[in-house]
Amino acid sequence: MLAEDTQPQIQAALRTLLATKDPSDEFVEITSGLPLAVSQLNVTYYVDGTLGFELFVEHPEEVTLVTDDVVGCAHHAPGDPLSTLGELGDDYEALEKDLLETVAVMVDLPEHPDDREQYVYGDLAFTNSVCYDGNLIFTLLYEPGKHVRGLYQGAAFGVGRRIGIPVEPETTEMVEEE
């Protein structure tokens, strides 16, 4: 379901964000190559080290969803659990599957559900957290393990040194060199 150039954009966003040692709510906005009525995908690396994925979708009038926060949108019902992206139809279910597979591979998401619980907030799905002025926002929150952050940060550091970008050494490296 993802366009050929969309998956590499998501992967590049994750590489860039996870290579950051001290995240400060930095985000990458993807707007090109998105399918269906999806207008935007934001990938945010929050100060606490959590990755947030927000998918903005135009609200189809005929669909009633369970949504956490509603501002100026019709067709919502109270309840729990929140609706997922897949509830918009088969095409959206396929899109959600593609997005989850891309994220899972890039951040080494554990395969077993019991192991995943410590990393994923809520269900392993893009849940409808907000409807604002006719746009649905589906979110997924994930806290990558220290090993994942370390791999991306170490790779960025190593690549920088290899291609000649001045990179400040870590204190431990300076002590080891002397």
Image (cartoon, rainbow, N blue to C red):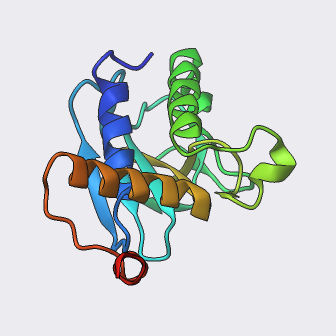
Residue 71: image quadrant is bottom left
- The answer to which of 133 and 47 lies nearer the viewer is 47
The picture places residue 9, in percent across and down from the top left corner, at 29, 34
Instruction: Kindly identify the residue that appears in the image at 32 percent across and 58 percent down.
Output: 157
In the image, farthest residue toward the front: 178
The C terminus is located in which quarter?
bottom left
Residue 159 shows in this picture:
yes
Asked if one can make out residue 72 in the rendered structure from this viewpoint, the answer is: no
Left/right of residue 24 with respect to residue 96 in the rendered view: left
- The answer to whether residue 98 is above or below residue 49 is above
Residue sitting at 50 percent across and 24 percent down?
A: 95
Question: In the displayed structure, would residue 13 be above or below residue 3?
Answer: below
Left or right of 56: which side holds 28? left
Relative to 85, say whether 173 is above or below: below
Question: With 171 as the anchor, is 121 left or right in this view?
Answer: right
In the foreground, 9 or 130: 9
User: Which image quarter: residue 37?
Assistant: top left
Residue at the right extreme, as displayed: 114
Question: Residue at 34% across / 80% down in the picture?
Answer: 174
Residue 85 figure quarter = top right
Percent from the top left, x then y, of residue 119?
Answer: 68, 58
Is 35 or 107 nearer to us in this picture? Answer: 107
Q: Which x, y percent locates residue 64?
A: 58, 38
Residue closer to the observer: 121 or 26: 26
Could you tell me which residue is drawn at 86 percent across and 50 percent down? 114
Label count reads 0
